[in-house]
Structure formats: structure tokens, C-alpha cells
Amino acid sequence: MADLRPAGSDSAPAAAPGAPGHLPTAAEVRTDLGRRTQEILEAPRDPVAPGAREREKAVVHECRYLMRLLAMRRRSEGEMRTRLARREVSTDIAHEVMARIDRAGLIDDAAFARDWVAQRRALRALGDEALRRELRDRAVEPAHIESALTTGRSDEETRCRDLVRSRIGHRDRQRLRAEGDGSHRRRLSRRLDALLTRKGYPGSLAVHVIASELREAADPALR
């Protein structure tokens, strides 16, 4: 579990479960958070100046805040820094808070990017460009972004097709098979293209998938 004490404390941090760099689960964070921070606040200390004591309390307070966020889901380093900035935490305090979070093994942008890509692909059917934008917005380094996107990249066309098929309803298929002027096909094509653009799929892939799926919807024998 995370050790929120300043560097140089006599007691070593508790060993994290699993492999090195293991990110504690939400249950582990919730279980240990109160105990660890209470130890910090109650541990006997040498007499210190009032200013130093107040600074330590501020650091612990912000560490507890970030760990509550981490108990809900992984966060990128950039997200955590942004949260501290929104709370108008001073640069000095923010630097110490992030240093302690880092020492606790709770900063892993590579793992964050992999999780983010997997979840957003599964839940939102997003294409690579949309995922790239979202990770950039969270200040994840380009190398971590591209590495995460490489996982499952060959399935982008499959995800795109599944999304298009899910938006072509039974009535759409009936109209495509019955119409003679192609007007519904054009309207449906524009709607699907706008959807795939919002989802971040490449234009060339969108055109190819939409055309083939509409042909198959109009003529089931093509499947």
C-alpha cells in the first residue's frame, strides 16, 4: 500500500502485492488509506516549526484526496496534477504530493493508457484517433499512447463494422431493399459517416465499411 510519509522516514513502505509497480486495487486503497494516513498524523515526531507542521498536514490532506480518486479508477500523472491545480494547491505542496504518490507506485501512465484504450474500445467503440485525442488531453506521453493503441489495432475494422451494423435497424434494411432511388441509402450513409467521424475512425475505413455494410443490408445474399 502507499506510503505517504516524507522521504527519509525510518520505516520502509509496506510491500505492495504482486509484481513490482503493482497498482493497488480499489479495495486495497480503501482498506489501507485510513490506517496509513492516521499513522502519519499520529506518529511521534521531533519538535518542528509550526510552518513545517502545517505544510505536512497539507501534503497528507492532498495525498488522501488523490488516493480517493485512485480508489475509483486509474489516473494519469497529468490528470492528478490537473486536479491539484484546480484545487489551487501551491507548487511546493503539489510537488511533494506527487513525489509521494510516485514513491508509492501509483503513477504508471503506460498501464493507464492500456486500460483506457481497452475500456473505451469496449464501452464506446472508439477508433484510434479519438482514443489518441483523449489520452493527449490527459497529458499521457506519445510513446505510451502509441504503445497502448498498438494492442488490438488489427481489430479496428471489426469494431467499425460492428458499430455500423448495430446502427442499421430492421426498418433501414427493409427500406434499402425496397427503394429504387437510393435516397434512404444516401441519408443513412451520411448519418453513419458522421457517427464514425465522432468515434475517431479513419475516413477511408469509414467509407469502405459503410459502403460494404449497406450493400449487404440491401442484399442479404451478399453476406
Image: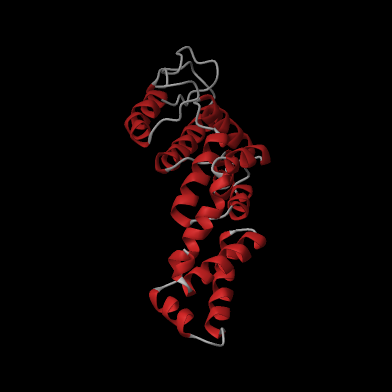
Image quarter of the N terminus = top left
Image coordinates of residue 179 in percent, x first then y, are: 50, 86
Q: Is residue 63 above or below residue 199?
A: above
The residue furthest top is 10
In the image shown, does 91 or 193 lie closer to the viewer?
A: 193
Q: Is residue 66 above or below residue 187?
A: above
Q: Residue at x 51, y 33 (%)?
A: 59
Q: Residue at x 42, y 80 (%)?
A: 174
| Occupied quadrant, residue 93 | top right
Count of numbered tags: 0
Image coordinates of residue 162 in percent, x first then y, are: 47, 59
In the image shown, does 137 or 155 lie closer to the viewer?
A: 155
Q: Residue at x 61, y 33 (%)?
A: 95
Image coordinates of residue 160 in percent, x first then y, are: 53, 58
Q: Is residue 16 above or below residue 121?
A: above
Image coordinates of residue 137 in percent, x first then y, are: 62, 51
The residue furthest bottom is 181
Q: Residue at x 49, y 38 (%)?
A: 62
In the image shown, does 30 or 42 lie closer to the viewer?
A: 30
Q: Is residue 210 above or below residue 43?
A: below
Q: How is the image coloured?
A: secondary structure
